[in-house]
Amino acid sequence: AFVGCIHCSCIKKICFATLNLKLTLQVQLSTLSTEPVIASKKPFKVELVCGKRHSWCTCGHSKKQPFCDGTHKTKTQGLMPQCFIPEKDSKTWLCGCKYTANPPYWDSTHKQEFIQSALLSENTDS
């Protein structure tokens, strides 16, 4: 009786706490944005290294623009970095507005009115 009583009580408390945690996380996730924020109204000039895996930020929240720093895990829902491996060393331009049709590369989308009139994220200086 002693073991059953204590263990049943503990298990119920743990399950209830876990259930509350799951519900809280679901509510928090449902309030996260599914759209990127505009990190910059211009592209970023970068040097890419052949054979190196690069992770381009798609959410716009990274403090290491234009690359991912993992911030999407707490700031967005469903946005993951775009990973790519260049076939040669190169200097190129990566999209800063996050709305390019050719990710991760810039395509002049940043010149459109909806980008130019948008407020920037507090994470960037551009």
Image (cartoon, rainbow, N blue to C red):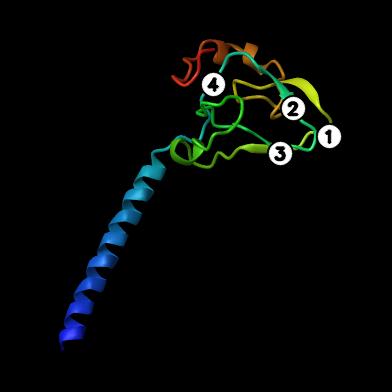
Q: Residue at x 31, y 61 (%)?
A: 18
Residue at image location 79% in from the left, 33% down from the top: 86
Q: Which residue has dot 3 on it?
A: 53
- Seen from the viewer's position, the closer of residues 35 and 124 is 124
Alpha carbon of mark 2 to alpha carbon of mark 1: how far?
9 Å
Q: What element carries label 3?
A: loop
The quarter of the picture where the C terminus appears is top right
Q: Where residue 123 appears, x then y in whole percent?
A: 47, 21
Instruction: Please state which of residues 24 and 117 is positioned toward the viewer in this rendering.
Output: 24
Q: What residue type is labelled 1?
A: Glu
Q: Residues within 10 Å of mark 3 (few under 14, many from 20)?
A: few
Give the camera-side residue of 88 and 37.
Answer: 88
Q: How crowded is mark 1: few (under 14 residues within 10 Å), some or many (20 or more)?
A: few
Q: Residue 57 carries which label?
A: none
- Determine the CA span between mark 3 and mark 4: 22 Å
Circle 1 residue? 87
What residue is shown with label 2? 48
Query: Where is mark 4, residue-wise?
Result: 39
Please tell me in which quadrant of the rendered image residue 39 appears. Answer: top right
